[in-house]
Image (cartoon, rainbow, N blue to C red):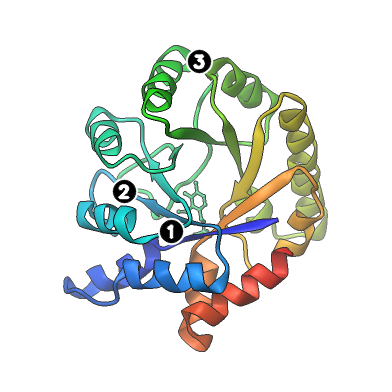
């Protein structure tokens, strides 16, 4: 399994003082040196962490792949079409949330999302949808013509009891199988850390995980590149 590193929280720390440091671009370079196969950043409508400059510089500097996480709003779509990341991941976005709270409502919005997907495909950009591990959303993702689905692992990660965690793991396992049978590439992310990652790695269809918060937290103690190496070792 591969690791993609989300650098949003490096920018969160920078924004706490409104200066230049720490720079998410610096973190992205160290993540690549540590073995990450891709860099993820979420350009939010309110620019609370990653900003336009970060995405532009990341596009120039990184040599693996740039995954731009974004809401499917006209302003951000126009920006993404200008930047041409390797991949865009469409997520739901609410101003009041601390982090992305759930999967995208794909079912019921196929017409719009298929149009957006077509626009990105015309520029050679792959499209991923961040969704709940549900057949309803997977079927809708197939109808949109996307390349990848990223399964939301937040409910699994937040489950308090062992039984609850096992139920969520089973949902992820069967959704992964279902999506792979539909010829979608399957990835996963949200709330993953060095403790809960092992079970996710037991799902063979999940090709990649996207991890930010726990990795940036670990980096405070061991350094960014070393933290990435630890997470790479945990997924391989
Ligand atoms: N995937 C998506 C779609 C996300 O929105 C996030 C959070 O930005 C992540 C993965 C990474 O989650 P975490 O920061 O909890 O590792």
Residue at the farthest bottom position? 221
| Category of crowding for the residue at label 3, using alpha-carbon neighbours closer than 10 angstroms: few (below 14), some (14–19), many (at least 20) | few
Q: Earlier in the sequence, mark 1 or mark 2?
A: 2
Residue bearing the label numbered 2: 43
Camera-nearest residue between 135 and 80: 80
- Inter-mark Cα distance, 2 to 3: 25 Å
User: Which residue is at 64% across, 76% downward?
Assistant: 230
160 displayed left or right of 174:
left
The percent position of residue 5, horizontal first and vertical second, equals: 50, 61
| Category of crowding for the residue at label 2, using alpha-carbon neighbours closer than 10 angstroms: few (below 14), some (14–19), many (at least 20) | many
Q: Earlier in the sequence, mark 1 or mark 3?
A: 1
Residue 232, numbered label? none
| Category of crowding for the residue at label 1, using alpha-carbon neighbours closer than 10 angstroms: few (below 14), some (14–19), many (at least 20) | some
- Inter-mark Cα distance, 1 to 3: 37 Å
191 displayed left or right of 47:
right
Residue bearing the label numbered 3: 108
Residue 63, numbered label? 1
State if disc 3 and disc 2 touch (CB < 8 Å).
no
221 displayed left or right of 153:
left
- Residue 98 against residue 218 in the figure, above or below: above
Camera-nearest residue between 86 and 127: 86
SS class of the residue under badge 3?
Answer: loop
The image quarter in which residue 115 lies: top left
Whether label 3 lies within 8 Å of ligand 1 gets the answer: no
- Inter-mark Cα distance, 1 to 2: 20 Å
> Would residue 196 be seen by someone viewing this image from the given angle?
no
State if disc 3 and disc 1 touch (CB < 8 Å).
no
The percent position of residue 34, horizontal first and vertical second, equals: 55, 73
Labels 1, 2: front one? 1
């Amino acid at each position: 399994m591969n690791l993609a590193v989300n650098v949003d929280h490096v920018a969160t720390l920078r924004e706490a003082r409104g200066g230049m440091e720490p720079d998410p671009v610096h973190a992205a370079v160290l993540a690549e040196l540590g073995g990450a196969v891709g860099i993820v950043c979420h350009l939010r409508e309110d620019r609370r962490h990653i900003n336009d400059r970060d995405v532009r510089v990341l596009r120039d500097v990184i040599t693996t792949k740039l995954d731009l996480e974004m809401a499917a709003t006209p302003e951000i779509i126009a920006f993404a079409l200008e930047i041409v990341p390797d991949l865009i991941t469409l997520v739901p976005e609410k101003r009041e949330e601390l982090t992305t709270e759930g999967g995208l409502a794909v079912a019921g919005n196929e017409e719009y999302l298929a149009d957006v997907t077509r626009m990105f495909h015309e520029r050679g950009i792959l499209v991923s949808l961040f969704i709940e591990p549900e057949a309803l959303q997977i079927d809708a993702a197939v109808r949109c013509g996307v390349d990848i689905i990223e399964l939301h692992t937040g409910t699994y990660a937040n489950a308090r009891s062992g039984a609850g965690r096992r139920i969520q793991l089973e949902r992820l396992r069967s959704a992964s199988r279902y999506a792979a049978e539909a010829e979608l590439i399957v990835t996963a992310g949200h709330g993953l850390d060095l403790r809960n990652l092992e079970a996710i790695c037991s799902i063979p269809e999940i090709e990649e995980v996207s991890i930010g918060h726990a990795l940036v937290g670990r980096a405070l103690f061991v350094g960014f590149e070393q933290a990435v190496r630890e997470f790479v070792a945990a997924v391989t």
